[in-house]
Structures are given as C-alpha cells and as structure tokens.
Image (tube, rainbow, N blue to C red):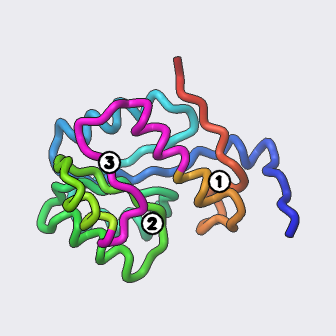
Amino acid sequence: MSHTPPSEHERRIPARVLIIEATEHVARHCLDILKQVDRLDLVRVISEAAAFEKMNSWHPQLLIVGDAVAGISGQELCSKIRLTSTIPMIFLTKHTDALHQIQCLNTGADDCIAFPFEAPIYVGRILCLLRRSYRYSRPPHPDAPRGIPQFQQRG
C-alpha cells in the first residue's frame, strides 16, 4: 500500500487539541506549554457536556482528559467517549502509582501522563500520538491534518 506524502497545505493545517480539565492551575500549565508548539489549535473545556459539544462541533484530533472534570470523573468521561469515538486520548493524572495509571489506560486512554510532568516529555508524547494516529489514516474531518504532522517546538 503506497502512502501519498502530505501537500504543503496539509502540513500547515494546525491540529486541534481539546483539553478537558476543571482544575485551573493544571489546565493553565498544560495550555502554557502547548502554546509554545507550532501548529496546535487549543481549546479547553471543564465539563462532560462541554466536551461532547466541542467534540461534535469542532472535531478535535486529540483529547487531553484530566482527573478533574466538572460533574464526572476523568476516567468515567474516558469510558463514555470510547463508547462512540476512537479519537486519540491522553489521560492526565495527579496519581503516580502504576495501578492508577493502568486503570486510566483501561478506561480507553491511549497514554497516561502524571502531573506535574516535564514539558519536553509531555509535548513529545502528544506529538507522537498525533503522528501515529494520523500518519496513514484519512482524517476524521475534512480540515484535519493528513500525513505526518511536522510540529516544531518553539525555542
């Protein structure tokens, strides 16, 4: 099966990342780091209802789901999302123990990152998941990036 390289236009389309986290300092830290990465379009919501509304209207390419979501646990939200979607998902947790992180993965997350985290590892995991998820697949929405994302972290 041959792979058509992405066009210059396709490489310039930003990837939409939806952050679902109610704790202000955690969300702010995530956003501040990701704002330094080229070609990411970032939106944050704090509740389950807002997350599903934004997923249906904005069509993000990646979800970052935190422990704290208004009205529901982050793990419950991951499980609900997985009932209808295969969107790449990273779970952000304050728990560092392996059992909790495995539980997060078992709810449907593709990766689990313990907060606080090192910025380069956080960015690297996000970009790796985007690259792996969209390298050979058709985009879930007409404006989604195709091919291998070529994001560059700003100096």
Write down the residue under mark 2: 57
Does residue 112 lie above or below 36 as drawn? Answer: below
Circle 3/circle 1 CB separation < 8 Å: no
Q: Tag 3's secondary structure?
A: strand
* Left or right, 21 with reference to 38: left
Q: Quadrant of residue 50?
A: bottom left
Q: Quick one: which residue is furthest to the left in this view?
A: 71
> Does 12 lie within the magenta span?
no
Residue in the picture at 63% in, 59% down: 134
Residue 69 coordinates in the image, percent (x, y): 18, 59
Q: Which one is closest to the eye, mark 2 or mark 1?
A: 1
Residue in the picture at 34% in, 37% down: 31
The magenta stretch is 106-128
Does residue 1 lie above or below 36 as drawn? Answer: below
> Does 116 lie within the magenta span?
yes
Q: Tag 1's secondary structure?
A: loop
Residue in the picture at 68% in, 66% down: 137
Residue 74 coordinates in the image, percent (x, y): 22, 63
Q: Which one is closest to the eye, mark 2 or mark 3?
A: 3
Write down the residue under mark 3: 113
Write down the residue under mark 1: 145
Reading the chain from its start, which is encountered first: label 3 or label 1? 3
Residue 15 coordinates in the image, percent (x, y): 55, 49
Q: Residues within 10 Å of mark 3 (few under 14, many from 20)?
A: many
Q: CA distance from mark 2 to mark 3?
A: 27 Å
- Label 1 sits on what residue type? Pro
- Label 3 sits on what residue type? Ile
* Left or right, 11 with reference to 112: right
Residue 80 coordinates in the image, percent (x, y): 30, 77
The quarter of the rendered structure image containing the N terminus is bottom right
